[in-house]
């Protein structure tokens, strides 16, 4: 059975905190979203993460969520994809919480998160 994936958010690489904040406010205004501050990024609602400095992916990242991350990893490996293990994050029970696929897709990194 195939895993179900849903779009979590789009991460947009910005050069600095000021640019990230300006873009988050602009996107919030356009789409009637609430801006909020994060440690590494500024958010426009739940949909846009404006990074305070460039991170993975030339343009940024696309975050996808799934309910069974371990099964999703196995499914994606079966499709020939690999993972950037340096980005793997685990919860307090040592279960995978999120990870990035290796490489870029249209200039974006792909971030897979546990729902």
Image (cartoon, rainbow, N blue to C red):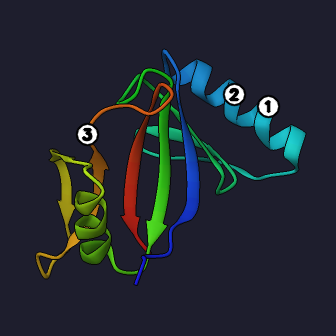
Q: Are marks 2 and 1 in contact (CB under 8 Å)?
A: yes
Q: Quadrant of residue 56?
A: top left
Per the model, the C-alpha gap separating discs 3 and 2 is 27 Å
Q: Earlier in the sequence, mark 3 or mark 2?
A: 2
Which of discs 3 and 2 lies nearer the camera? The answer is 3
> What is the x, y in percent for residue 15?
49, 15
* Residue 76 in the image: above or below residue 42: below
User: Closer to the camera, 9 or 4?
Assistant: 4
Question: Residue drawn at (30%, 68%), measured in percent from left and top?
Answer: 75
Binning the other alpha carbons within 10 Å of mark 2 as few (below 14), some (14 to 19) or many (20 upward) gives many
Residue under label 3 = 102
Label ID, residue 79: none
The secondary element bearing badge 2 is classed as helix
Question: Residue drawn at (80%, 52%), measured in percent from left and top?
Answer: 33
Per the model, the C-alpha gap separating discs 2 and 1 is 5 Å
Residue under label 1 = 26
Q: Are marks 3 and 2 in contact (CB under 8 Å)?
A: no
Binning the other alpha carbons within 10 Å of mark 3 as few (below 14), some (14 to 19) or many (20 upward) gives some
Q: Quadrant of residue 69?
A: bottom left
Residue under label 2 = 23
> What is the x, y in percent for residue 114?
37, 71
């Amino acid at each position: 059975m195939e895993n179900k994936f849903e779009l979590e958010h789009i991460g947009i690489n910005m050069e600095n905190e000021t640019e990230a904040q300006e873009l988050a406010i602009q996107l919030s205004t356009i789409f009637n979203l609430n801006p909020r501050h994060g440690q590494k990024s500024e958010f426009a609602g739940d949909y846009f993460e404006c990074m305070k400095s460039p991170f993975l992916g030339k343009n940024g990242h696309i975050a996808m969520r799934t309910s069974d991350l371990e099964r999703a990893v196995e499914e994606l490996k079966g499709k020939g994809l690999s993972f950037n293990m340096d980005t793997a994050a685990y919860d307090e029970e040592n279960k995978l919480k999120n990870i990035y696929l290796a490489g870029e897709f249209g200039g974006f990194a792909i971030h897979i998160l546990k729902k």
